[in-house]
Image (cartoon, rainbow, N blue to C red):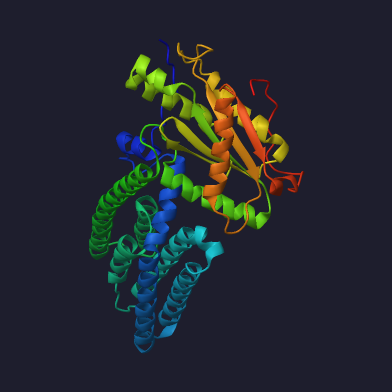
Amino acid sequence: MSAPGVSVPESPYTAQLQQGFRALRFARALEHEFRAESALQHAFRLRVGFGVAMAIYLLFLLLRLKAETGPAGQWALIFRGVGIGAMALTLAVSYLRPLRPLLPYFVLASYAILALGMTGIEVLSYRHGVERHYEGLILLSFHVYVFSGLLFRPALLAGGFMFLAYLIGGWLGGLAGQEWAYQLLFIGLTHVIGGTALYSIERVERDAFLRRRMIGVAATHDSLTGLFNRIAFFHEFERAARQAAREGVAIGVVLLDIDHFKAYNDRYGHLAGDTCLRAVAGAIREEFRRPLDAVGRYGGEEFIGIWHDVQPQSIRSLADQLRAAVQALRIENRDAPSGRVTASVGAIVCVPQEGEPLAELIKRADGALYDAKEKGRNRVVIEVMPSARAAPRSGGRRAPSITGAG
């Protein structure tokens, strides 16, 4: 007995968790998904962090107005003003939806401006004999790892820039000395401690992200075939039907049943039956790739699918494509007239109406499937409902014509 099936595709979340992510990097699609979720989760913390930092920095600026005079005071005022402006702009961008993808760049730019400004103030203070306060750079370093909302790599980039800005700026500005070396040491240690903590936190967040997604997949997908389970499919069905009703386009509802499957199970055993179900699921999955298309396991050996925005004249060839995909697996079944596993398909095409019970559409597709089995199996029966006959003929999904039973 030959049953070369198509195995259930492993969840990308499971695969990534098994593969690991010591470098704090997922596969491209998962990385994009994780970063989008992370940005939403950390948005509030970023806003609070930048808002509080901006208020404190502004208060410090006002307090230093009287203490700092002359050229050093004027330049310090300019540097601090630019820093406050950078933080205010970053804060504003966090609320502007079109600019949110650029938010990390604004955050990095803000830290770069603040680091350069604080370094400049240190150099000017030294040259004009004003008391220096390098502690601001330590607080800024702490801020990067706690309130920035940045992931480990960009946070490390910001921290590295701060350290280099003070190192190079201090060297060129004449700060070099024992006190400056101690300052560099403490600033560097702040980044090491902060970076280590953020690395650990991000590893935990990435692990939790994968596990949440794995639970989500398990809740919405059939464990044997990897297709939507019945509940999840109906959710997708409702969404697609509402969209089609708003757009006035036709949908195709299709039911597929594996022929003589009970006899197949009795002859070859349930493990072979499971392999057959996985193979059929893998074959028909390929026919539901467009947005708003969906396919699920309806129960037992029966599968259900929906095509969104389908041309009524194409529904037969689409449904026959499903039937042919199952037959093309060439899974042996001695109890079938053809000697191979085959499937019967019933489908309807309609333009759904707002509030129309979806159960009625499935009932009609089930009636078409019953007719297909009554007429000899391994064939397709289609019902074009009156609403679909008036659907637009341009656009919509087309399918190549396939010669086969039915």
- Horizontal and vertical percent position of residue 131: 29, 78
The image shows a total of numbered marks equal to 0
Residue 4, quarter of picture: top left
State the residue at coordinates (37%, 20%): 265
Viewer-closest of 36 and 14: 14
- Horizontal and vertical percent position of residue 397: 67, 39
Quadrant into which the C terminus falls = top right
Visible residue check, residue 149: no
State the residue at coordinates (38%, 68%): 44
Q: Is residue 281 above or below residue 5?
A: below
Visible residue check, residue 203: yes
Viewer-closest of 21 and 302: 302
Viewer-closest of 307 and 259: 259
State the residue at coordinates (28%, 66%): 138
State the residue at coordinates (60%, 36%): 347
Q: Is residue 23 above or below residue 51?
A: above
Quadrant into which the N terminus falls = top left
In the rendered view, does 322 fall on the left or right side of 262?
right
- The furthest residue to the front: 374
Q: Is residue 404 above or below residue 214?
A: above
